[in-house]
Amino acid sequence: MELTPQQKASRPLLYLGLASIGMAFAGLTSGYVVARSSLVAANNWQTIELPMWFYLSTAAVVLSSIVLRRAQKQISVETKPTSLVVLVLLLGVLFAVFQVLGWADLIDQKIYFTGEGSKPEASWLYVITWFHWLHVLAGILVLLLMLVRTSRGYYVGAKVLRFTLGAQFWHFLGFLWLYLLGFLLILR
């Protein structure tokens, strides 16, 4: 199967985009480390217990990647994995909802992003998770497009590459969340 020049360029372009996203998060986490270091030195850092919802969202994103991997295998043998893509989309939405519930839990604990009573460690936590959440919303849109195309039998021949690239974007977001959660757990 011969790829068009556009298809040949799509994978490097995706990787360039993923590298850009990765660098943005590297900058955010570096800023967090610097802020944390100075506040710890001043004995002014409050450890924040991460909400249970963040762990549930982790389970949702890991499960979504497992299911999406299975869908990728089915699409590669020209089977329509519509129900699997529906499940991945639902798990993606569930991830996003769990994140919102996590922020609500933080607010219930009087841990605010800004304003009276806010602390830098809370602001960093919100910014890092919000920024990831915005990327997840983009990922949900990609999953929705993948679902529509899967249900229409679009992914055949060279067009399977588009499914693969969408899946790689979603897997990247899941891996990024695992990194961020580990980072926030280690450097609370």
Image: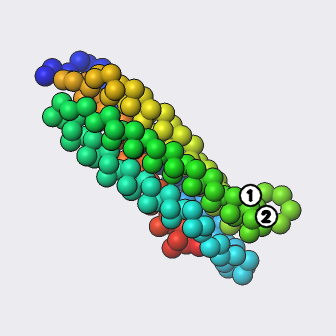
Counting residues from the start of the chain, the first of labels 1 and 2 encountered is: 1
The answer to whether residue 118 is left or right of residue 66 is right
From the top left corner, tell me how far across and down residue 135 is, in percent. 52, 42
Q: Is residue 95 visible?
A: yes
Residue marked by disc 1: 113
Number of residue marks: 2
SS at mark 2 in the image: loop
Quick one: label 2, few (<14), some, or many (20+) residues within 10 Å?
A: few
Q: Is residue 30 visible?
A: no
Q: Residue at x 38, y 31 (%)?
A: 147
Q: Amino acid at mark 1?
A: Phe
Q: Nearer the viewer, residue 162 or 153?
A: 153
From the top left corner, tell me how far across and down residue 91 is, in percent. 45, 48
The quarter holding residue 137 reads top right
Q: Quadrant of the C terminus?
A: bottom right
Q: Are marks 1 and 2 in contact (CB under 8 Å)?
A: yes
Q: Residue at x 61, y 50 (%)?
A: 130
Q: Residue furthest left?
A: 1
Q: Residue furthest top?
A: 4
Question: From mark 1 to mark 2, how far is it between C-alphas?
Answer: 6 Å
Q: How is the image coloured?
A: rainbow
Q: Amino acid at mark 2?
A: Ser
43, above or below 7, in the image: below
From the top left corner, tell me how far across and down residue 143 is, in percent. 42, 36
Q: Residue at x 43, y 60 (%)?
A: 59
Residue marked by disc 2: 118
96, above or below 155, in the image: below
